[in-house]
Image (cartoon, grey):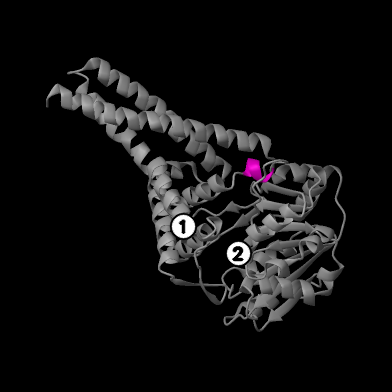
Amino acid sequence: MPHWVMVVIGWTLGTGVLGAMIVWGLVWFRVEMSHATIPTLRRGQRLAGQTPPRGRVCVVVPAHNESRVIEGLVRSLKAETYPELRVVLALDRCTDDTAAIARRAVGDDDRFEIVEVTVCPEGWAGKVHAVHSGVAQSNAARDAEMLLFADADTLFEPGCVAAAVAMMRDRQVEFLSLISTLTCDKWFERVAQLAAGFELIRQYPLTRANASKDRRAFANGQFMLFSRAAYERVGGHESVKDAILEDLALAKRADELGVSIGVFFADGLFRCRMYADWAQFRRGWKRIYIEAANRKPDRLASAAWRTRWLGTLLPAAMFVAIPFALWVRPFDAPMGWTLLGMCGVALVLWLGALLRMTWFAHAPLWTAPLHVVGAWLVASILSEARADIIHRRATTWGGREFVMEQK
């Protein structure tokens, strides 16, 4: 191979490796900053142990055909030790045996109440209407001082509610949301889940979600705890009745109305399996990304391009550069050694950042390098989401069909 060709290849690979060093160094820095400045629910657990919180809490859970998970949720809530806890299960137009399983799981526990929703009016998103119905039709919800909205596919560790209430009061917020700890035992959870969550957090950094100035409002609908006064001030779920992502809509509305918001890490005290299979994973994350991008195809295209480059192509340049540097070293030692040194630094920064992210996510550490594949899969989901908007493809979610029009 002519020397000039080796030089061109070396410079090209070196540029990619340098990019990987810069990007993943910054990612690692931001990961550490986030976890140094944003408390986890473990702090609330310690606070609750020192001074047990008080106040009537009602958990409202919407459920549409959730026979797979409803029993686990009910059992976890039955194990909750919070003394003033009530639970409302809003069963939304279920066509499976969710209701029977829920009643059997609840048994004679009088803390639970079941509301069956038989119709969803025009102009309402299904989940939002189910939550609204649960609040409106439940005596426990009407009497509560705090309202906690959770998804049916979640699991509460004992003491989770007390920790959240203690954290809310310690941080002096009126609206608290948790980034749940996600399960990680299915192949797509191990390969693509970290990359999917990373892209969403990139768009809505938690440091900005918790900032007092220049805030970018964000909440996770899997766990949203409101004070009664704050919930009424934002107008309840009725104020966002047509929202596909009611959590983002409520967060934005709360921010506009001056409601103080805190978004913290659950750190294992609250868990969620978002999707049962790969098809649901793709469909669910498309819906999330479309709404997070405000239904703008250009934003989705940019996010797909960025995810491919940063998550897959830059690390790939590093892996290609290592054997190339070893091969070229006998012919051009300075180039070979320089490239090897850069690859070593880039590898440490890339793998170090991913290992820290995986550790904080409570996922197996061996899954960290799979991010290089997961990022490509997530980029394909982003591209597909863009195509769905452009071609006006319908999607079904929560028992209703939607065509997400671009804005």
Q: Residue 121 at what x, y percent from top left?
A: 65, 81
In the image, residue 9 above or below residue 392: above
SS of the residue at dot 1? loop
For the point 50% across and 45% down, the residue is 364
Which residue is painted at 28% across and 30% down in the image?
12
* Residue that appears at 40% across and 29% down: 346
**Which amino acid does the dot numbered 2 rest on?**
Asp
Direction from residue 183 to residue 334 in the image, left or right: left
Q: List x then y, in percent, for residue 166.
A: 81, 48
Give the percent coordinates (x, y) of residue 76. 69, 62
- State whether residue 383 appears in this view: yes
Q: Is residue 234 left or right of residue 245?
A: right
Q: Which residue is mark 2?
A: 153
In the image, is 213 to the left or to the right of 318? right
Residue that carries the numbered disc 1 in the rendered image: 186
Q: In the rendered image of this protein, does residue 233 appear above or below residue 127?
A: above
* Residue 26 horizontal side relative to residue 344, left or right: right
User: Distance from label 1 to label 2 (Cα)?
Assistant: 15 Å
Q: Which residues are magenta?
A: 206-210
Q: Quadrant of the N terminus?
A: top left
Residue 328 image-quadrant placement: top left
Q: Position of residue 171 (x, y in %)?
A: 79, 43
Which one is nearer the viewer's eye here, 67 or 257?
257
Three-letter code for the amino acid on which mark 1 is drawn: Lys
- Tell me if I can see residue 105 in this picture: no
Q: Residue at x 59, y 33 (%)?
A: 32
Of labels 1 and 2, earlier in sequence is 2
Count residues near mark 1 (Cα–Cα under 10 Å), then give few for <14, some for 14-19, many for 20+: some
Secondary structure that dominates the magenta span? helix
Secondary structure beneath disc 2?
loop
Q: Which one is in front, 24 or 405? A: 405
